[in-house]
Image (spheres, helix red, strand yellow):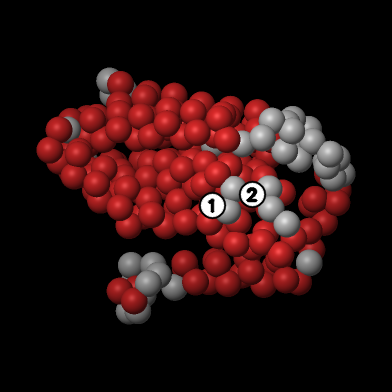
Protein backbone atom coordinates (compact mmCIF):
# COMPACT_ATOMS: atom_id res chain seq x y z
CA UNK A 1 0.00 0.00 0.00
CA UNK A 2 1.48 3.43 -0.92
CA UNK A 3 2.75 5.57 1.95
CA UNK A 4 0.37 8.31 0.79
CA UNK A 5 -2.59 6.09 1.74
CA UNK A 6 -1.10 5.63 5.20
CA UNK A 7 -0.76 9.41 5.37
CA UNK A 8 -4.50 9.69 4.74
CA UNK A 9 -5.05 7.16 7.54
CA UNK A 10 -3.04 9.43 9.84
CA UNK A 11 -5.39 12.30 9.01
CA UNK A 12 -8.41 10.09 9.61
CA UNK A 13 -6.96 9.11 12.98
CA UNK A 14 -6.71 12.73 14.06
CA UNK A 15 -10.22 13.63 12.92
CA UNK A 16 -11.72 10.53 14.51
CA UNK A 17 -10.00 11.28 17.80
CA UNK A 18 -11.28 14.85 18.06
CA UNK A 19 -14.81 13.80 17.15
CA UNK A 20 -15.27 11.49 20.13
CA UNK A 21 -12.74 12.70 22.70
CA UNK A 22 -15.16 15.17 24.26
CA UNK A 23 -17.37 12.30 25.44
CA UNK A 24 -14.83 11.30 28.07
CA UNK A 25 -14.28 14.88 29.23
CA UNK A 26 -17.82 16.15 29.80
CA UNK A 27 -17.54 16.38 33.58
CA UNK A 28 -14.24 18.27 33.41
CA UNK A 29 -15.48 20.65 30.73
CA UNK A 30 -18.75 21.29 32.57
CA UNK A 31 -16.92 22.13 35.78
CA UNK A 32 -14.36 24.33 34.05
CA UNK A 33 -16.91 26.27 32.00
CA UNK A 34 -19.44 26.38 34.87
CA UNK A 35 -22.22 24.83 32.84
CA UNK A 36 -24.34 21.74 33.33
CA UNK A 37 -23.22 18.36 32.05
CA UNK A 38 -26.19 18.48 29.66
CA UNK A 39 -24.93 21.75 28.22
CA UNK A 40 -21.44 20.30 27.90
CA UNK A 41 -23.01 17.40 26.02
CA UNK A 42 -24.27 19.84 23.43
CA UNK A 43 -20.64 20.20 22.33
CA UNK A 44 -21.14 16.79 20.73
CA UNK A 45 -24.24 18.03 18.93
CA UNK A 46 -22.38 21.18 17.87
CA UNK A 47 -19.71 19.06 16.25
CA UNK A 48 -22.36 17.05 14.45
CA UNK A 49 -23.91 20.28 13.21
CA UNK A 50 -20.53 21.38 11.87
CA UNK A 51 -20.18 18.10 9.99
CA UNK A 52 -23.69 18.46 8.57
CA UNK A 53 -23.02 21.99 7.31
CA UNK A 54 -19.36 21.66 6.40
CA UNK A 55 -19.45 18.45 4.36
CA UNK A 56 -21.64 19.67 1.46
CA UNK A 57 -20.51 23.29 1.71
CA UNK A 58 -16.76 22.68 1.58
CA UNK A 59 -17.09 19.80 -0.88
CA UNK A 60 -18.83 22.06 -3.38
CA UNK A 61 -16.55 25.02 -2.67
CA UNK A 62 -13.37 23.00 -3.24
CA UNK A 63 -14.46 20.71 -6.06
CA UNK A 64 -12.27 22.51 -8.63
CA UNK A 65 -9.20 22.78 -6.41
CA UNK A 66 -6.25 20.39 -6.40
CA UNK A 67 -7.03 17.58 -4.04
CA UNK A 68 -3.77 17.70 -2.13
CA UNK A 69 -4.30 21.39 -1.45
CA UNK A 70 -7.82 20.64 -0.25
CA UNK A 71 -6.57 17.95 2.13
CA UNK A 72 -3.90 20.23 3.57
CA UNK A 73 -6.40 23.05 3.97
CA UNK A 74 -8.83 20.77 5.79
CA UNK A 75 -6.09 19.51 8.09
CA UNK A 76 -5.13 23.12 8.82
CA UNK A 77 -8.76 23.87 9.80
CA UNK A 78 -8.72 20.78 11.99
CA UNK A 79 -5.50 21.81 13.75
CA UNK A 80 -6.52 25.44 14.27
CA UNK A 81 -9.94 24.37 15.52
CA UNK A 82 -8.49 22.06 18.16
CA UNK A 83 -6.02 24.71 19.29
CA UNK A 84 -8.97 27.11 19.58
CA UNK A 85 -10.80 24.53 21.72
CA UNK A 86 -7.80 24.32 24.05
CA UNK A 87 -7.66 28.12 24.36
CA UNK A 88 -11.40 28.80 24.60
CA UNK A 89 -12.06 31.06 27.62
CA UNK A 90 -15.79 30.36 27.78
CA UNK A 91 -18.47 27.90 26.71
CA UNK A 92 -19.67 29.90 23.71
CA UNK A 93 -16.22 30.13 22.13
CA UNK A 94 -15.59 26.46 22.87
CA UNK A 95 -18.79 25.60 21.00
CA UNK A 96 -17.74 27.82 18.09
CA UNK A 97 -14.31 26.14 18.00
CA UNK A 98 -15.91 22.68 17.98
CA UNK A 99 -18.12 23.66 15.04
CA UNK A 100 -15.09 25.11 13.21
CA UNK A 101 -13.17 21.89 13.72
CA UNK A 102 -16.08 19.82 12.45
CA UNK A 103 -16.24 21.67 9.13
CA UNK A 104 -13.27 19.64 7.88
CA UNK A 105 -14.67 16.26 8.87
CA UNK A 106 -16.96 15.13 6.06
CA UNK A 107 -15.00 16.70 3.21
CA UNK A 108 -11.73 15.14 4.40
CA UNK A 109 -13.17 11.64 4.26
CA UNK A 110 -14.87 12.31 0.93
CA UNK A 111 -11.82 13.79 -0.78
CA UNK A 112 -9.50 11.38 1.00
CA UNK A 113 -11.43 8.38 -0.30
CA UNK A 114 -11.15 9.64 -3.86
CA UNK A 115 -7.43 10.32 -3.44
CA UNK A 116 -6.80 6.91 -1.85
CA UNK A 117 -8.61 5.17 -4.73
CA UNK A 118 -6.60 7.15 -7.27
CA UNK A 119 -3.26 6.15 -5.76
CA UNK A 120 -3.64 2.45 -6.56
CA UNK A 121 -4.85 0.23 -9.36
CA UNK A 122 -8.52 -0.61 -9.91
CA UNK A 123 -8.16 -3.97 -8.16
CA UNK A 124 -6.86 -2.34 -4.93
CA UNK A 125 -9.15 0.66 -4.64
CA UNK A 126 -11.42 -0.88 -2.01
CA UNK A 127 -8.40 -1.90 0.05
CA UNK A 128 -6.92 1.60 -0.18
CA UNK A 129 -10.15 3.21 1.04
CA UNK A 130 -10.43 0.63 3.83
CA UNK A 131 -6.84 1.37 4.86
CA UNK A 132 -7.60 5.06 5.12
CA UNK A 133 -10.65 4.40 7.29
CA UNK A 134 -8.51 2.16 9.51
CA UNK A 135 -7.24 5.43 10.97
CA UNK A 136 -10.78 6.18 12.14
CA UNK A 137 -11.07 2.72 13.71
CA UNK A 138 -7.75 3.10 15.54
CA UNK A 139 -8.86 6.52 16.75
CA UNK A 140 -11.97 4.97 18.31
CA UNK A 141 -10.05 2.09 19.90
CA UNK A 142 -6.88 3.88 21.02
CA UNK A 143 -6.90 7.60 20.28
CA UNK A 144 -10.08 8.49 22.16
CA UNK A 145 -9.31 6.51 25.36
CA UNK A 146 -5.73 7.80 25.43
CA UNK A 147 -6.89 11.36 24.83
CA UNK A 148 -9.48 11.06 27.60
CA UNK A 149 -6.75 9.74 29.90
CA UNK A 150 -4.59 12.78 29.10
CA UNK A 151 -7.59 14.98 29.87
CA UNK A 152 -8.14 13.30 33.23
CA UNK A 153 -4.47 13.48 34.19
CA UNK A 154 -3.50 16.91 32.82
CA UNK A 155 -6.81 18.67 32.25
CA UNK A 156 -9.20 18.70 29.32
CA UNK A 157 -7.32 21.50 27.57
CA UNK A 158 -4.22 19.29 27.39
CA UNK A 159 -6.29 16.69 25.55
CA UNK A 160 -7.18 19.18 22.84
CA UNK A 161 -3.56 20.33 22.62
CA UNK A 162 -2.60 16.70 22.08
CA UNK A 163 -5.14 16.37 19.27
CA UNK A 164 -3.88 19.62 17.72
CA UNK A 165 -0.37 18.11 17.79
CA UNK A 166 -1.74 15.07 15.94
CA UNK A 167 -3.09 17.51 13.35
CA UNK A 168 0.36 19.07 12.89
CA UNK A 169 1.94 15.65 12.40
CA UNK A 170 -0.81 14.54 9.99
CA UNK A 171 -0.41 17.79 8.01
CA UNK A 172 3.34 17.17 7.68
CA UNK A 173 2.83 13.55 6.59
CA UNK A 174 0.21 14.51 4.01
CA UNK A 175 2.41 17.32 2.68
CA UNK A 176 5.36 14.95 2.34
CA UNK A 177 3.80 11.81 0.90
CA UNK A 178 0.61 12.69 -1.01
CA UNK A 179 1.55 13.41 -4.65
CA UNK A 180 1.03 17.00 -5.76
CA UNK A 181 -0.70 16.03 -8.99
CA UNK A 182 -3.03 13.35 -7.60
CA UNK A 183 -6.37 13.58 -9.39
CA UNK A 184 -5.12 16.40 -11.61
CA UNK A 185 -6.34 14.67 -14.77
CA UNK A 186 -9.89 14.19 -13.48
CA UNK A 187 -12.27 16.99 -14.41
CA UNK A 188 -14.91 17.76 -11.75
CA UNK A 189 -18.33 16.35 -12.48
CA UNK A 190 -21.21 18.71 -13.12
CA UNK A 191 -23.09 19.70 -9.98
CA UNK A 192 -26.34 18.29 -11.39
CA UNK A 193 -24.62 14.93 -11.96
CA UNK A 194 -23.35 14.83 -8.39
CA UNK A 195 -26.77 15.61 -6.93
CA UNK A 196 -28.39 13.04 -9.22
CA UNK A 197 -26.55 10.33 -7.28
CA UNK A 198 -29.04 10.83 -4.45
CA UNK A 199 -31.79 9.50 -6.74
CA UNK A 200 -30.14 6.09 -7.08
CA UNK A 201 -31.96 3.32 -5.19
CA UNK A 202 -28.67 1.93 -3.84
CA UNK A 203 -27.78 5.29 -2.28
CA UNK A 204 -31.26 5.76 -0.85
CA UNK A 205 -31.13 2.26 0.65
CA UNK A 206 -27.77 2.95 2.27
CA UNK A 207 -29.02 6.23 3.72
CA UNK A 208 -32.19 4.59 5.02
CA UNK A 209 -30.17 1.81 6.69
CA UNK A 210 -27.96 4.41 8.37
CA UNK A 211 -30.88 6.51 9.63
CA UNK A 212 -32.91 3.54 10.87
CA UNK A 213 -29.85 1.83 12.36
CA UNK A 214 -28.76 4.80 14.43
CA UNK A 215 -32.35 5.70 15.23
CA UNK A 216 -32.77 2.26 16.73
CA UNK A 217 -29.90 3.04 19.11
CA UNK A 218 -31.77 5.90 20.82
CA UNK A 219 -31.76 5.83 24.66
CA UNK A 220 -35.50 5.12 24.71
CA UNK A 221 -35.05 1.93 22.73
CA UNK A 222 -35.02 -1.29 24.78
CA UNK A 223 -32.29 -2.65 22.48
CA UNK A 224 -30.07 0.45 22.67
CA UNK A 225 -27.51 -1.40 24.77
CA UNK A 226 -26.78 -3.65 21.80
CA UNK A 227 -25.77 -0.78 19.46
Disc number for residue 10: none
Q: Is residue 34 visible?
A: no
Quadrant containing the C terminus in the rendered view: bottom left
Q: Residue at x 46, y 34 (%)?
A: 170
- 62 lies left or right of 31: right
Q: Is residue 173 above or below residue 117?
A: above
Question: Which residue is disc 1 drawn over?
Answer: 132
Q: Indicate the position of residue 175 as horizontal and vertical percent values.
A: 56, 29
Q: Nearer the viewer, residue 58 or 167?
A: 167
Q: Indicate the position of residue 145 as horizontal and vertical percent values.
A: 25, 51
Of mark 1 and mark 2, the one earlier in the sequence is: 2
- 218 lies left or right of 131: left
Residue that extends furthest to the bottom in the rendered view of this protein: 222
Q: Nearer the viewer, residue 170 or 29?
A: 170
Q: Residue at x 24, y 29 (%)?
A: 157
Q: Indicate the position of residue 209 as horizontal and vertical percent values.
A: 58, 72
Q: Residue at x 22, y 34 (%)?
A: 156
**Is there a contact, CB below 8 Å, between mark 1 and mark 2?**
yes
Question: Which residue is disc 2 drawn over?
Answer: 116
- Looking at the rendering, which quadrant does residue 91 occupy? top left
- Looking at the rendering, which quadrant does residue 89 occupy? top left
Amino acid sequence: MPIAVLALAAGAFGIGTTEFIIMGLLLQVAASMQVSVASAGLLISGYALGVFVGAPMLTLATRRMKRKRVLLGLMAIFTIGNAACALAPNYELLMAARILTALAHGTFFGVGSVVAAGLVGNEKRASAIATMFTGLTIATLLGVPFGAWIGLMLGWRAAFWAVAAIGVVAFAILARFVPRDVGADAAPAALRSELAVLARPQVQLALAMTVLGFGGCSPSSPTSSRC
